[in-house]
Image (tube, grey):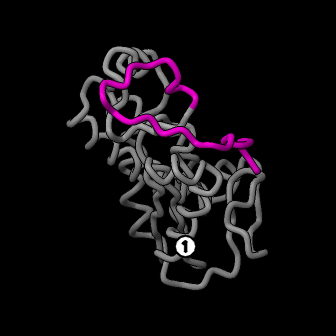
């Protein structure tokens, strides 16, 4: 499994899960961050045809606001695992935080660069979320979601300062302090978001 969108200001948090075939390999699978967008798109089709199973789990921007990022990531992970349609007895995840639980997780630092299954999951997750953000760009062109995918950048920040948030922005985050709201309701969580990895 691998996650994308945790640090984004807008859109879903997305987790990809794949089950690799034991007897077949596909070449040139790399961590999604090491590939261009065109390379990821081309690799996506090869991966979904190659793997035994694949699934995506999302936590919406509303769920990220309501639950906080840690619990939203757990929710997206459950959705991805349920989407596989098999009972996974072991799960590899990138990083050092076990967001799956139940004693079946192995965490791997830089796993997206060292594990074929995590690298494949990272491409599936990244391409799926990027496609969603490109669709949102058609409705919210000022934020340049097609290029930044909802992540912080000068154009995105300037659009927020001028227009306020869109309907897909995460409204509870600290970056929302000091921006105009233009009639859109701000969501304030009563408790702190907590550490990045709990």
Q: Which of the image's four quarters has the N terminus? A: bottom right
Which residue is at 35% across, 19% downward? 159
Q: Secondary structure at mark 1?
A: helix
Where 102 falls versus 77 (above or below)? Answer: below
User: Is 171 positioned to the left or the right of 137 in the image?
Assistant: right
Where 57 falls versus 182 (above or below)? Answer: below
Q: Give the percent coordinates (x, y) of residue 179.
A: 44, 19
The crowding category of the residue bearing disc 1, from other C-alpha atoms within 10 Å (few below 14, some 14 to 19, many at least 20), is many
Where 136 falls versus 117 (above or below)? Answer: above
| Magenta residues (range) | 174-198
Residue 4 or 159: which is nearer the viewer? 159
Which quadrant would residue 130 be assigned to in this image? top left
Q: Give the percent coordinates (x, y) of residue 137.
A: 27, 35
User: Is 82 positioned to the left or the right of 93 in the image?
Assistant: left
Residue 12 or 62: which is nearer the viewer? 62
Which quadrant would residue 138 be assigned to in this image? top left
Is residue 188 part of the magenta span, yes or no?
A: yes
Identify the residue position indicated by label 1 in the image: 81
Residue 186 or 14: which is nearer the viewer? 186
Q: Give the percent coordinates (x, y) of residue 40.
A: 42, 46
Which residue is at 78% across, 75% downward? 103
Q: How many marks?
A: 1
Which residue is at 54% across, 26% downward? 175
User: Is 76 positioned to the left or the right of 166 in the image?
Assistant: right
The secondary structure that most of the magenta stretch takes on is: loop
Which residue is at 33% across, 33% downward? 184
Q: Give the percent coordinates (x, y) of residue 22.
A: 60, 78
Is residue 76 part of the magenta span, yes or no?
A: no
Report the residue that reaches farthest toward the left: 138
């Amino acid at each position: 499994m691998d996650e994308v969108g945790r640090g984004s200001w807008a859109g879903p948090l997305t987790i990809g899960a794949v089950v690799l075939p034991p007897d077949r390999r596909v070449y040139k699978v790399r961590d999604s961050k090491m590939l261009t967008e065109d390379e990821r798109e081309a690799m996506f089709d090869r991966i979904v045809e190659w793997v035994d199973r694949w699934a995506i789990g999302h936590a919406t921007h509303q769920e990220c606001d309501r639950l906080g990022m840690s619990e939203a990531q757990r929710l997206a992970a459950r959705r991805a695992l349920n989407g596989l349609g098999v009972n996974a007895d072991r799960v590899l995840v990138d990083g050092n935080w076990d967001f799956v639980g139940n004693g079946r997780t192995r965490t791997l630092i830089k796993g997206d660069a060292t594990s074929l299954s995590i690298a494949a999951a990272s491409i599936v997750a990244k391409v799926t979320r990027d496609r969603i953000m490109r669709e949102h760009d058609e409705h919210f062109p000022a934020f340049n979601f097609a290029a930044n995918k909802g992540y912080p950048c000068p154009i995105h920040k300037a659009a927020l300062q001028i227009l306020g948030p869109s309907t897909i922005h995460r409204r509870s985050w600290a970056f929302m302090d000091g921006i105009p709201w233009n009639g859109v309701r701000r969501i304030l969580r009563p408790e702190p978001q907590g550490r990045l990895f709990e």
